[in-house]
Image (cartoon, rainbow, N blue to C red):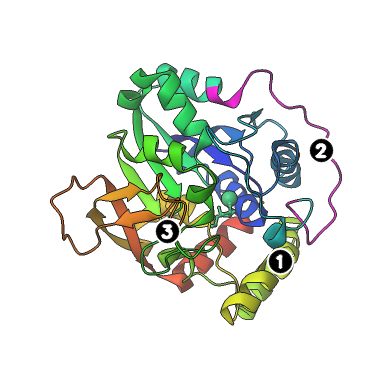
Amino acid sequence: MSRKIIIDTDPGQDDAVAILLALASPEEIDLLGITCVAGNVPLALTTKNARIVCELAGRTDVKVFAGCDRPMQRKLVTAEHVHGKTGLDGIDLPDPQMALQEGHGVDFIIEQARAHDGITLVPIGPLTNIGTALQRAPDIAAKIDEIVIMGGAYFEVGNITPAAEFNIYVDPEAADIVFKSGIKLTVMPLDVTHKVLTTKPRIAALRALSGPVGPAVASWTDFFERFDMAKYGSEGAPLHDPCTIAWLIKPELFTGRHINVEIETGSELTLGMTVADWWGITDRPKNAFFMGDCDAEGFYALLTERLARL
Ligand code: RIB
Ligand code: CA
């Protein structure tokens, strides 16, 4: 039985891989639409990039919406240093021909939550659209089955500041709304995504796929990985966002704990930190299933098998 999902995204090469994995998995995923948010690059580019990815997969039928162009209360922080000026550096693909949907992404999220008996939201960028939807329409919290988030960190701590992961850091107020919403939360933090590295053999398998998708993904990761490899000295880059979709397809690839996670919104020093009670030190409510480990070989075997379908 496939799950009805909305992917909320700031493409971003790793976002692109997550979208492609979802499009390649109709047995498990009924993609209601894609809502774009400002994050890795400004909104005008994330909406363009989302459509480039859909067209690469031959899926001009996918509904793509523009959402919020800045965080709820703060100035936008972007990540061109990681993703390049376009947000999809690594390969030049044609500008999209498919149109953006009329209407705002936040309204789409609200409408779809009210229209269906239980949807899953998959935010893989800053949580601005999700936080805004929950603030504008608190009734939808009861209609959302699960929110599967790429964001936060515990042992890995931070990647945009010493204390915070990018998606949470860009809009900590929105993240605070989501983590206090009472909705079932599954969190893919850096602790997991840093275990699914784009090693040479894994990317070679993708590059060897027939059709345009595998080679395009390999070209994106060739660009995307340079930053993290230089920073961490690792043998590849973490493929963050597709971990959320892999969870929906094959949850047994992941292990985690139900713990309390709260968001720092007051201190400028630790703004956006996910304060994760991994060791159960407090009696705060266990509001999140926070991942700690992943079968990386299994993840890449799934990703390669599914992208071969496109
Ligand atoms: O910190 C990693 C996250 O920030 C990923 O979602 C990446 O695409 C960027 O948005
Ligand atoms: Ca992202």
- Earlier in the chain: of badge 1 and badge 2, it is 2
Q: Amino acid at mark 3?
A: Pro
User: In front of the other: label 1 or label 3?
Assistant: 3
Q: Is residue 194 magenta?
A: no
Q: Quadrant of residue 49?
A: top right
Label 1, residues with CA under 10 Å away: few <14, some 14-19, many ≥20: many
Under circle 3, the secondary element is loop
Residue at 68% over, 61% down: 82
Total marks in image: 3
Indicate left or right for 268 with 66 as reference: left
Above or below 256: residue 120:
above
Percent x, y for residue 265?
41, 44
Residue at 40% over, 70% down: 295
As measured in the structure, the alpha-carbon distance from the residue carrying label 3 to the one carrying label 2 is 31 Å
Give the number of the disc on residue 96.
2
- Earlier in the chain: of badge 3 and badge 2, it is 2
Under circle 2, the secondary element is loop
**Whether label 1 touches label 3, CB < 8 Å:** no
Above or below 164: residue 29:
above
Label 2, residues with CA under 10 Å away: few <14, some 14-19, many ≥20: some
Q: Where does the magenta region start and end?
A: 87-106
Between residue 240 and residue 38, name the one nearer to us.
Answer: 38
User: In front of the other: label 3 or label 2?
Assistant: 3
Percent x, y for residue 96?
81, 38
Give the number of the disc on residue 189.
3
Indicate left or right for 241 with 49 as reference: left
- Earlier in the chain: of badge 1 and badge 3, it is 3
Q: Is residue 94 magenta?
A: yes
Q: Amino acid at mark 2?
A: Pro
Q: Amino acid at mark 1?
A: Ala
Principal secondary structure, stretch drawn in magenta: loop
